[in-house]
Image (cartoon, rainbow, N blue to C red):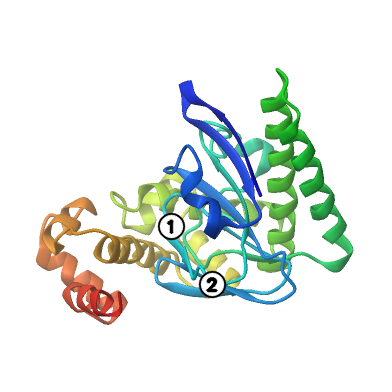
Amino acid sequence: MKFEYSFDKLDSIFAITDSLQKDEESFSVKTGINKILWNRNDQPLTIIVDDLEITLLPNQIITTTFFHHVTYNHKELPVTAFLFNREFYCIVDHDAEVSCNGILFFGTQDLPVITIPEEQKHKFDLLWEVLLEEFKTRDNIQGEMLQMLLKRLIIICTRLAKEQLIVKKLNDSQIETIRQFNFLVDIHFKTKRKVKEYADLMYKSPKTLSNLFATYNQKSPQQIIQERVVLEAKRLLHFTDKQTQEIAFDLGFDDPAHFSRYFKKIAKISPSEYKESHSLSA
């Protein structure tokens, strides 16, 4: 079962499906898609995001952006999914409404896996049922209604992510700083690789960011930047035919040799070795 709302002139899309594996190729827009993936089964299921295997327990949710490469075994249990692009609802432009960037989407660190508490499961089930009804209602305000329901889903997921994934002793201002840093790194990692550059954008000192992240997850801001650069390099090595020199220039390195040293320092393997190992596994 799948439903899609689209506006051809803008390539706008919002869609839901109870089996993403089966329906993904049938949607009218296939690029630039953000996804909210939900395991509604009573057993765990496995998906692969980039080259990371992730197991979702029953009633767990994970969010991905168009940066991610999501694959799954078609023999796996079905994945329920909500799909939308920026033309339908831009989470960057509407960040003041939902405050999800850097937490649910466009974060630089571990992918957020959210567990729906038993006492809140009815909220998600009800929202799913309301969405099904709204997709069947064809009138001139259908787009606005669907956008409102998507916004509600994002807000609920963001609240759970903050409760479950962020250190309790951080205050709202500190959480906002972490969120902003994560988002900025995801946007600017190709051109800015120094903590000071991000600190300047945020009107903070590098030391303030370092102290905050030591409390948050033990990763330094510099480590987060480096890992984001290497993650993008791995995507390009794994999912494209680009050579190391092209990838180095794409990521803002003037010297391919410098890029190779940078990659090996963080990934503990050279770009060519990484590419070869994933070609063999594929």
Q: CA gap, disc 1 to disc 2?
A: 21 Å
Q: Amino acid at mark 2?
A: Lys
Residue 127 in picture, x, y percent from top left: 80, 47
Q: Circle 2 is placed at which residue position?
A: 75
Quadrant where the C terminus sits is bottom left
Tag shown at residue 68: 1
Identify which residue, 209 or 224, lies in the foreground.
224
**SS label for mark 2:** loop
The image shows residue 75, relative to residue 30, as above or below, that is below
Task: Say the numbered circle drawn on residue 180.
Answer: none
The amino acid on which the numbered mark 1 sits, given as a three-letter code, is His
Q: Is residue 104 visible?
A: no
Compared to residue 133, the image places residue 76 above or below, namely below
| Position in image of residue 88 (x %, y %) | 56, 32
Q: Nearer the viewer, mark 1 or mark 2?
A: 2
- Quadrant of residue 253 in the image? bottom left
The residue tagged with tag 1: helix, strand or loop?
Answer: loop
**Closer to the camera in the image, 177 or 45:** 45
Residue at point 24%, 71% (across, down): 263
State left or right for residue 260 relative to residue 21: left
Q: Classify 10 Å Cα crowding around label 2: few (below 14), some (14-19), many (20 and above).
A: few
Q: Nearer the viewer, residue 234 or 276?
A: 276
